[in-house]
Image (cartoon, rainbow, N blue to C red):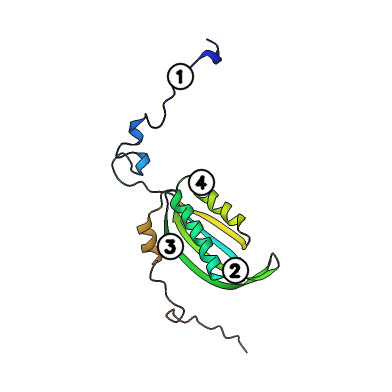
Amino acid sequence: MPLALQTRPVLSLFNQKKLFAPGHGALGLNPKGDRMKLPGYETTFITRVDLSDDGLKTLKDRLFAVVKAYGGELVYEEDWGKRKFAYEIQKEVRGHYTHFVYTGKGDVVHEIERNLRLHESTLRFMTVNLAKEFDKEVFTKELGVGTALKREDRPAQAEIIPNS
């Protein structure tokens, strides 16, 4: 039979009830009924210093909305503040660093990086894949997230005194 004349019935996702039954992928559950673990990512981005606090908050809110739209969750967010660069980036000598850890499925990283590229105040960004099956509880225990020490509470660093 010629290839053009062969037909197969097309089943829509709505007719495949197993995808929407409890305990299956559409609900984020594996066949045992446990919640599936999503991949984990961390993204650090640098914005121009002249970006206002409201502008930075708007950018972060947009990125966090993307994470939510892709079925993910924001695990950790930290503002590293304004720092001086080792070399100029797009004729800037200082930048505002922001770091966040999140989970998500599909093209969540692609969409976050697309939003960062479109924002005119973004100088650089980097995304790292942490794990295929990211466990939030293990992450918070290992890194002590939520108990970050303030600069005043950190142990003093040893000073190096040159030999005279």
Q: How packed is label 2: few (under 14 Cα within 10 Å), some, or many (20 or more)?
A: some
Q: Position of residue 63 (x, y in %)?
A: 50, 57
Q: Is residue 113 above or below residue 28?
A: below
Label 1, on which residue?
A: 8
- Whichever of callouts 4 and 2 sits on the residue coming sooner in the sequence is 2
- Whichever of callouts 4 and 1 sits on the residue coming sooner in the sequence is 1
Label 3, on which residue?
A: 76
In three-dimensional space, the C-alpha distance between marks 4 and 2, rounded to whole angstroms, equals: 28 Å
Helix, strand or loop at mark 4: loop
Label 1 sits on what residue type? Arg
Helix, strand or loop at mark 1: loop
Label 2, on which residue?
A: 51
Mark number displayed over residue 107? 4
Label 3 sits on what residue type? Tyr
Q: Nearer the viewer, mark 4 or mark 2?
A: 2
Q: Position of residue 102 (x, y in %)?
A: 45, 56
Q: How packed is label 3: few (under 14 Cα within 10 Å), some, or many (20 or more)?
A: some
Is disc 2 in contact with disc 1, using a CB cutoff of under 8 Å?
Answer: no
- Whichever of callouts 1 and 3 sits on the residue coming sooner in the sequence is 1
Q: Is residue 109 above or below residue 148?
A: above
User: In the picture, which quadrant includes the C terminus?
Assistant: bottom right
- Whichever of callouts 3 and 4 sits on the residue coming sooner in the sequence is 3
- Whichever of callouts 2 and 1 sits on the residue coming sooner in the sequence is 1
Q: How packed is label 1: few (under 14 Cα within 10 Å), some, or many (20 or more)?
A: few
